[in-house]
Image (cartoon, rainbow, N blue to C red):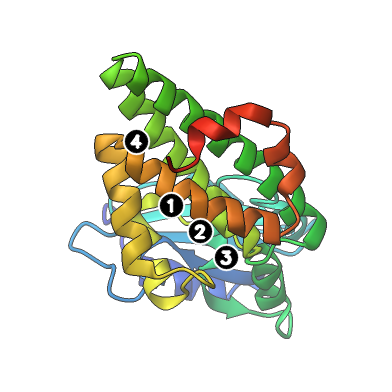
């Protein structure tokens, strides 16, 4: 790198690797997902510093160019990143470039990739209720001739359903960009990936009531088997509107 030239990924990695304050380098985004790189893909890199370390690399925090985005954090901050938060999936599928902690960076990423039992249960209950709420509203709106509202609620229900299904598998839900990538490589147990994606697509696009009810029948069985029947039972007689006729 010379004066006036942009900082490149390879140049920065070499510089960071030579700095003893750096305990980890973690690449996230499309370049951490096989076959997802395009001509527009940049390098999104976490730079993990030893706690209380002194290094001139901190000045690169927030560096952002079309080719390189840098996040510079302490080890403590890295452990907390995405726990919970939007970054969790990105870090769960991130690629390790440097790990000076004898596998410590890898263990931190592995913890982000799996929800613990209590977290998964709480999340699943919340997403199940949100899914049922949007489904119910969609069907009511369709019944009352509110087509746009019905489709919007159906699209919301599809989002909440995916959150629910990944929580039931104790995984953070992937971003929409990586949904098909994730399911092709790590299918949800008990679900046919192609059929699930086709159904979610139709529900989100059309708000078809019969389709939503058929899907709900499957989800109800899965949720009750997982021990979340009480969430559904709280809906009382309103379940009748959601179930297939």
Task: Identify the disc placed on residue 92.
Answer: 3
Residue that protrudes farthest toward the left in the picture = 39
**Badge 3: residue crowd in 10 Å (few <14, some 14–19, many ≥20):** many
In percent of width and height, residue 195 lies at 33, 64
Q: Residue at x 66, y 59 (%)?
A: 55
Residue 53 lies, in percent from the top left, at 75, 60
Question: Which residue is denoted by mark 4 in the rendering?
Answer: 209
Q: Residue at x 34, y 35 (%)?
A: 209
Marks 2, 4: nearer the viewer: 4
| Dot 2 or dot 4, earlier in sequence | 2
Q: Quadrant of the N terminus?
A: bottom left
Real-space Cα distance between discs 2 and 3? 6 Å
Instruction: Identify the secondary structure beneath mark 1.
Output: loop
In which quarter of the view is residue 146 placed?
top left
Name the spot of residue 157 as percent of width and height, x first. Answer: 46, 37
Vertical comparison of 91 with 119: above or below? below
Q: In this view, does 36 lie to the left or right of 130?
A: left
Q: Name the residue under label 1.
A: 175
Q: Report if the CB atoms under discs 1 and 2 are less than 8 Å apart.
A: yes
Quick one: label 4, few (<14), some, or many (20+) residues within 10 Å? many
Instruction: Find residue 139 and report its image quarter.
Output: top left
**Of residues 150 and 90, the one drawn nearer to the viewer in this rendering:** 150
């Amino acid at each position: 790198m010379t004066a006036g030239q942009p900082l490149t990924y390879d140049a920065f990695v070499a510089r960071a690797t030579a700095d003893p304050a750096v305990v980890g380098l973690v690449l996230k985004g499309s370049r951490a997902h096989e076959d997802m790189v395009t001509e527009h893909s940049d390098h999104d890199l976490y730079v993990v510093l030893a706690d209380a370390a002194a290094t001139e690399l901190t000045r690169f925090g927030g560096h952002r160019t079309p080719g390189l985005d840098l996040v510079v954090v302490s080890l403590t901050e890295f452990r907390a990143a995405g726990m919970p938060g939007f970054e969790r999936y990105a870090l769960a599928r991130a690629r390790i470039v440097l790990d000076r902690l004898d596998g410590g960076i890898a263990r931190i990423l592995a913890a982000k990739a799996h929800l613990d039992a209590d977290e998964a249960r709480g999340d699943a209950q919340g997403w199940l209720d949100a899914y049922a709420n949007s489904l119910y509203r969609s069907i009511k709106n369709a019944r009352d001739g509110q087509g746009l509202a019905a489709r919007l609620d159906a699209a919301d229900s599809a989002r909440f359903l995916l959150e629910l299904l990944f929580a039931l598998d104790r995984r953070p839900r992937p971003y929409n960009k990586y949904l098909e990538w994730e399911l092709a490589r790590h299918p949800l147990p008990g679900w046919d990936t192609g059929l699930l994606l086709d159904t979610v697509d139709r529900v989100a696009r059309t708000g078809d009531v019969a389709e939503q009810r058929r899907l709900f029948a499957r989800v109800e069985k899965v949720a009750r088997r997982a021990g979340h029947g009480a969430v559904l039972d709280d809906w009382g007689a309103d379940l009748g509107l959601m179930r297939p006729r």
